[in-house]
Amino acid sequence: MSQEFSPVQPLLPIKGRGAANWPEHRFARDERSAFDDGWGGGALADDPGAVRTELSWEQARSALSRHESPDLPYHLGLNPYRGCEHGCIYCYARPTHSYLGWSPGLDFETRLIAKKNLPELLSAELARDRHVPSPIMLGSVTDCYQPIERELRLTRRLIEVLARARHPFTIVTKGSGVERDLDLLAPLAEQGLVSVHLSLSTLNPELARRLEPRAAAPYRRCSTIQTLAAAGVPVGVSLAPQIPFLNDDMEQVLAAAAEAGARHAFYAVLRLPWELAPLFEQWLGLHYPQRATRVMERVRDLHGIDQAGREAGRSYNSQFGQRMKGQGLWAQMLAQRFRLACRKLGLNREPLRLDCSQYSPALLQKQQRLF
């Protein structure tokens, strides 16, 4: 009896990476698939560490991005990098790499771009008399404290510009590197100009390593919350995303964050736009094959996908007002759990407000005239 042979190379998880391969982006004209040509498994099979991080620089054309989404409290975004080495498999920003002609898979977490001139651009935009101040989200489609920030210090330079202009901003990060900039953040916090949210989806270290392979460990993020709070920085916690049958420890996460000093919290359900849906399903099959089907069915329930939509392969509802919190019984249950836990722990008792009245373009105009 001859042994059955499959020409397709088996897909395996890569240590320290969220994605396992390079699926084509949605604008690709050709579709490629790997196969065994008889010359061995290749670099990935023998040396998973062969997937190196590459960094390139670009001259950005603008600093601030604007959106009108009613689901988000901030309408101005500021992102020093494209891509993110944290490698979170669920990241809704992965499909943005498609605009570069790169894969939302491994390319998103290994082919990074730093915006070299961003601090100068930000200074010029905030110096315009027509700029209307509104709190800026620093790190809306990337993590501004991902590992490369340690050397590049782009985020710190942006904070320095915002501090000179007295412009309010908030930071959402998984990186403990935010502690490095406490000398800037603490004085700004005293003036009501900054807040920080640590993203903490689970306390389970093994699950976190698989979901967010190069982000700070959950206990380290709790320590960062404690450090920020002790320095007087308003700090909150983001429980995003909520993934059915995976990170089912919402109450424990909120309790740990509150004990560390967090006073605000928010959550969002898993969102799977564009190429992210098949990428996340692939990850589930590699790491949690026994519950993969159940997880995806519940995600579709949360987004109100009907039978026709399921047969068409849909997993996500992008409608404003529903995409962040979901709909139906499971969404209602999540909302109730979150509300009760926050009430018990004293979270979100007071609204978090940042002061826009201190901003003045003249502060930067004077600075520019010195040069």
Image: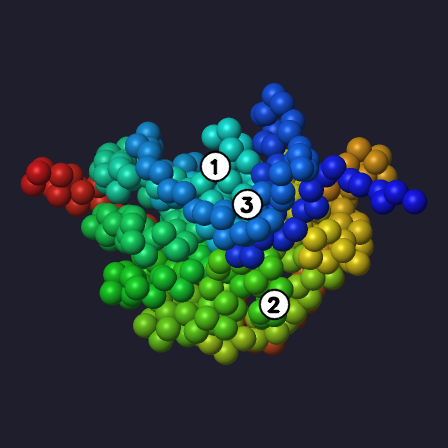
Q: Is residue 167 above or below residue 318?
A: below
Q: Earlier in the sequence, mark 2 or mark 1?
A: 1
The numbered disc on residue 206 is 2
Q: Earlier in the sequence, mark 3 or mark 1?
A: 3
Say which amino acid is labelled 1: His
Residue 169: x, y in percent?
36, 52
Residue nearer the viewer, 30 or 355: 30
Q: Is residue 180 above or below residue 12?
A: below
Residue furthest toward the top? 29
Q: Is residue 369 left or right of residue 46?
A: left
Q: Secondary structure at mark 2?
A: helix
Q: Is residue 306 left or right of residue 319?
A: right
Q: Quadrant of residue 95?
A: top right
Q: Earlier in the sequence, mark 2 or mark 3?
A: 3
Residue furthest toward the bottom? 259
Tag in front: 2 or 1: 2
The numbered disc on residue 43 is 3
Give the distance between the C-alpha atoms of the residues marked 2 and 3, in whole angstroms: 26 Å
Residue 241: x, y in percent?
61, 55
Residue position for label 1: 67
